[in-house]
Image (cartoon, grey):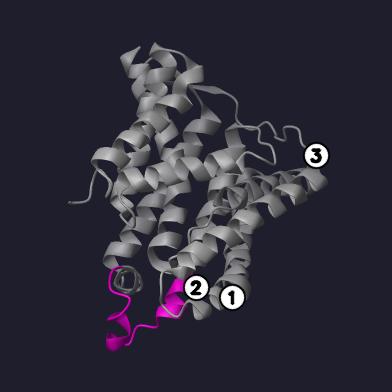
Amino acid sequence: MLLSTLIVGLVLGGTFALMALGLTIQYGVARVMNLAYGELVIGGSFLTYLTIMAFGLDPFSALAIVVPFGYAASYMLYATVMRPLERRSGGSGRLEVDSILVTFGLMFLLQGIYALSFGSGFTGYSWLELPVDILGTKVAASRLIGALLALAVGSALFFAMQKTRWGMAMRAVASRPGFAPLVGIDNERHARAAFATGGALAAAGGVILSMFQPFTPTDGVFVTMKALVIIIMGGVGNLAGAIAAALMLGLIEAGVSAAVDPGLTLAATYAIFLAVLLWRPNGLFNRG
């Protein structure tokens, strides 16, 4: 049972990690707390469903359509909505408050569009439902592939942020926005790119989610809340912390589901979230 819980928890955590990374980079670099982030994830799931039903593609092929669409849509959203808010804030903390209010409204708008287009019930498709035996534990092939894909994308992003000039500039904007222009870094351009990259990650998360789980127009709320829990547990702007927190959350949910009651996984998640807020408000992996 322990091995089974460990494997299921890591698979869950890998999926959570990808979804949380997009919100981490949007908030850490662009300073936008995007409460409609989960709706972008679910939008990626609906778009994947459409490409599969309309063109007979598989989810891997759908990635080549959905991810660039997520990047372009988020780029336009930043340019038309967030950038004017950023200009109006004049570098003050007002941008964070305004972005919360705007994306809160956007969340309901997108939910309405999805419900009108696809109905309020579950949407999904069947893909690779064969069980895979891992050391005696059966895991659905679609879920396993989704988790591995999420870890691969998350690792690539982490490498890019740590080892490339693009990543160095992003980290400079995130940690020292006032000093970054002094060394020739364009804060606005990198904030826009970070917001768009977060949208692309949300879209990729939507593709992966759709591989193994049906979804509804309102599921994005739970995705956003879980991503926020992971960000706060890992430390705001800390990509490695977010990945570690996501894996930890996956293990906790798998453990509670196996040992106590599957209906208590959400309660366990928020109990830990409250504990972190009280005793480690800067995150489990940040100092202070």
Circle 1 SS class: helix
Looking at marks 1 and 3 on the same chain, the residue that comes earlier in the sequence is marked by: 1
Q: Is residue 143 magenta?
A: no
87 versus 163 height, above or below: below
94 versus 277 height, above or below: below
Circle 2 SS class: helix
| Residue 72, image quadrant | bottom right
Query: In the image, what residue occupies the spot 50% across and 73% down?
Result: 192
Mark carried by residue 79: 1
Looking at marks 2 and 1 on the same chain, the residue that comes earlier in the sequence is marked by: 1
Label 2 crowd bin: few (<14), some (14–19), many (20+), radius 10 Å: many
Mark carried by residue 192: 2
Q: Are marks 1 and 3 in contact (CB under 8 Å)?
A: no
Label 3 belongs to which residue? 119
**Mark 3 residue type:** Gly
Kindly tell me whether residue 149 is visible in this rendering: no
Q: Magenta segment range?
A: 175-193
Residue sitting at the far left: 288
CA–CA distance between discs 3 and 2? Answer: 33 Å
Residue 285: x and y in percent read: 23, 46
**Would residue 183 be found to the left or right of residue 225 on screen?**
left
**Mark 1 residue type:** Ala
- Number of numbered discs visible in the structure rendering: 3
For this rendering, which residue is in front, 28 or 66?
Answer: 28
Circle 3 SS class: loop
| Residue 191, image quadrant | bottom left
Query: In the image, what residue occupies the spot 45% across and 61% down?
Result: 26
For this rendering, which residue is in front, 31 or 259?
Answer: 31
Label 3 crowd bin: few (<14), some (14–19), many (20+), radius 10 Å: few
**Would residue 280 be found to the left or right of residue 112 on screen?**
left
**Mark 2 residue type:** Arg
Mark carried by residue 97: none
